[in-house]
Amino acid sequence: MAAEDLELSAALIPDAAGRQPVLAARDLHKAYGRVVAMDGADFDLYPGEILGVIGDNGAGKSSMIAALAGAVRPDSGEIWLAGEQVRFANPMEARAKGIETVFQTLAMAPALTIVDNLFLGREYRKPGFRGRWLRALDRGRMRAEARKHLSELGLATIQNIDQVVETLSGGQRQGVAVARACAFGSRVIILDEPTAALGVKESRKVLDLILDVRRRGISIVLISHNMPHVFEIADRVHIHRLGRRIAQVRPDQISMSDAVAIMTGAMPPPTDDDQGRT
Amino acid sequence: MSSDDTPHFSEHAGPGRRVINFLHGNPTIIPFLVLVIGLAIFSLIVGKRFFHPFNLSLVLQQVTVIGMLALAQTLIILTAGIDLSVGAIMVLSSVAMGQMALTLGLPPEIALLAGIAVGAACGALNGLLITWLRLPPFIVTLGTWSIFNAFVQFWSGGQTIRQQEIAADAAILQWTGTALQLGAWRLTLGSVLMLGLAGLLWYMLNRTAYGRHIYAVGNDPEAARLSGISTRRVLFSVYLLAGAICGVAGWVLIGRIGAVSPLGGGSANLDSITAVVIGGTSLFGGRGSILGTLIGALIVGFFRNGLALAGLDVLWQEFSIGCLIIMAVGFDQWLRRISN
Amino acid sequence: MSKRSWLACGAAIATLCLGVSTAQAQDDILVGLITKTDTNPFFVKMREGASEKAKELGVKFQAFAGKFDGDNDTQVQAVENLIAAGAKGILIVASDTKAIVPTIQKARDAGLLVIALDTPLEPMDAAQATFATDNFHAGELIGEWARRSMGDEAASKAQVAFIDAHESQPTVDVARDQGFMKGFGIDIKDPARRGDEDDARIVGHEMGEGSEVGGRNGMETLLQKNFDVNVVYTINEPTAAGAWEALKAAGKADGSVLVTSVDGGCPGVKNVADGVIGATSMQFPLLMASLGVEAIVEHAKNGTVPAPSEGLTFTNTGVKLVTDKPVEGLESITSEEALKICWG
């Protein structure tokens, strides 16, 4: 590691078990003209945890997430992935390094099948002549893998893997989107408002799905306005306000209403350096 | 992990739901049924003269040129675009081929390839204006339609190159008109070429990643972009490819009429769109198939032929084609609505 | 300079301009030509003829055309543009002979002389003059030729296919069609309407829109209706060329079918020489156009309106029958002779 890296990674604080954050950022700045989106934002995500990210509209959390996912280039600041400093030019580079994002819109083409969507942009080709010269898709392999990923997440009962996505229910679509995020060896999955459009029953299923994903060792960033959901499954909560992180708390050490109060500025953030890690 | 605590989304689909899901995945069934029913009705009304291999293969020949344009149009409409200049590109390519071979004296094979290249260049212009200037395809191709027509007039000088001259000096340009007798079926090489091209395009759309990308860009450009697909490159390449196909259609046109003529092509634009729409491809992009387009072109051809043989006035042909279009679009809309 | 000098200068300049403009007014005659399309060589020849004549007479000339045969809207706009540009007269080959009339009336009200070329308007007097081929006579010539060529069989064994232009029955379409029938010996009932005949020798009417593609499609359909077609009437030579391709494909290009047409374009005349077309009636578009320009200039200078030909309601620019298989009693010229005077 370069001397610079050493010096800065000293700023990365290990958790109680002594592990480094899997994804971290320090002092991110981004301005669009006179509008400041990020004003020295910090971020820490530890391996195998679910980190809830809450913040009011306009607090700048979307910009920060976008920077972590490679969709936005910060004006200044550093981002580390597994201890190594990274700089993403576009979301594909972040994806290649193992950061997958499940957008609020799910980013799935409704008229295409589950398999098509799962592998959109990273399709498998048949080996040899047929793949290289005739550019033939290896549909058998893709279907088998799709089925495997879906069943690993307990979605095996989706009737038909060649079903088009728009015939699935909202919760099923969310499930497929999450399965896609998990399918390609990701280390970090960012979920943007996963339960926002769902009813009670389907939200329940998605929350269980998220817990399942954590069980597989993937670290999860959960952005949500739904406090009960966040408090139910998150290990820690990152509170964002005015372009920066103002607190990291643990759901078992703070009440929901207090967290909301900190988020809106009605209450000052806690001063302990614990960072809510232990 | 026991099956108790894994989330699953089981849904027992009722028969109605299953039919709807089936139609979603196989929308081409409907135009196919329309074709079969149409053939049955006309066979009953007109009799043996209609349902005879000679007549059936005649209709195939008659729809070959429009069918080829419709193949190009299918690709474009799948990306939620539209091309109003396909007819003009076709005529321009045929004029280019003829003029280069007979007036400029180029070797006919070179003239043929150059003519197709002219078609590709026209398509590239469309693609450039749409992806670079980000103008709506309808407007761009409306403009290029007039531009290409002007070039047709300019290059041909309003002159037709007669069949006899082409046969003498550049017979390869008429090659697509050569007849093939397969038992009682009479095809032209142009029809075979069209069917072959349809097969190639089918393969491209269904068995390659590029094909999937075309559907994705048409269905949900944002999702495509977020998946790392360059929507600009896909769109540009589609218009370029379509232009080349229209160039080949120009070759088929020469085979059909024997001459190189600046006339015609006017209604071909809308006829190609008609075939695509009746074949079940959605004008909103992302849904449709090559097979559907072929069926759509055949439906139009058989309806015209059947009504003419039944002795009905030409206006009934227009009426029925209009009804078919509305039914096709209506069905597509219904299918979309009930899924949401 | 003093104020008086300024005034004097100003007055001098004004008089000069006025004088110059009045002197130029005579040469500022604008003649407009509006054709159906600019792709059909017939209209290309017209445009050339009109343009040359205009240059010869020293007047300004503007040409317009529709986008396709049947495009009325573009022609309407062209008339309006010419009115606004202060044209003295308009020569028009109307795509829709009925729909254009109100706009023509506007031009007449604005003082322009409107001459219909080739295709009479409906009603014919909507234009102050019509310079045209006698399309009915043109059809009659080829109908006569076909009848006499068949001899006795014309009455008994003829099966005639008609490939016209448009469903909407424009005047030129109907005139040639009905003229052919009369020449061939079919009772045409109402000469202003096509399709009201019931002669058993008629196989059918197909619309070819005046192009090769339409000719091919139309001929194929008519052959399907009755394979024994032995006489074909086509509205123009591109249609005939397309029909020939269909006949070839059906194995009937052996001279057993008489193909007739109207136009007299050079490609058509060459087709007569090659045996594709049996006989065609030649028109003289160049004459139509140049006479038309002359008439407008005359009118602009001293208000005279061109008078129609003797016994006709229009000025007949003439028609000649072109065939390499002449028949007794019918005057015609050979394709070789026709090649010298053809157009396109």
Image: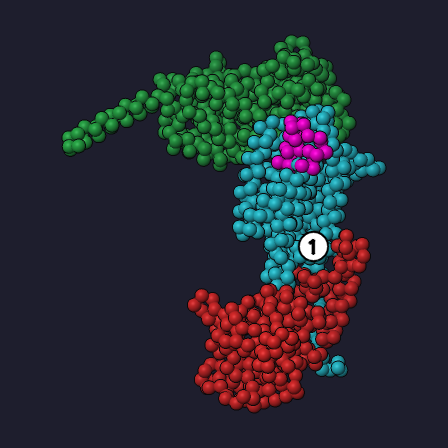
Please, is residue B288 above or below residue C205 in the view? below
The secondary structure that dominates the magenta segment is helix
Residue C269 placement: quadrant = top right
Please, is residue B215 above or below residue B171 in the view? below
Look at the image and tell me whether residue C121 can be seen.
Answer: no
The residue depicted at 77 percent of the width and 27 percent of the height is C251
The residue depicted at 74 percent of the width and 27 percent of the height is C248
Residue B125 placement: quadrant = top right
The one nearer the camera, A171 or A59, is: A59
The one nearer the camera, B85 or B228, is: B228
Please, is residue C133 above or below residue B317 in the view? above
Region in magenta:
B90-114
Instruction: Give the x, y percent position of residue C285.
Output: 54, 20
The picture's colour for chain B is: cyan
Q: Which of the chains is red?
A: A
Q: Which of the chains is green?
A: C
A73 with respect to B311 (left or right): left
Q: Residue furthest right?
A: B183
Look at the image and tell me whether residue A140 can be seen.
Answer: yes
Task: Using a 10 Å C-alpha cutoff, classify the residue at mark 1 as few (fewer than 14 neighbours), some (14 to 19) or many (20 or more).
Answer: some
Instruction: Give the x, y percent position of residue B31.
Output: 69, 50
Q: Which residue is mark 1?
A: B211
Please, is residue B178 above or below residue B138 in the view? above
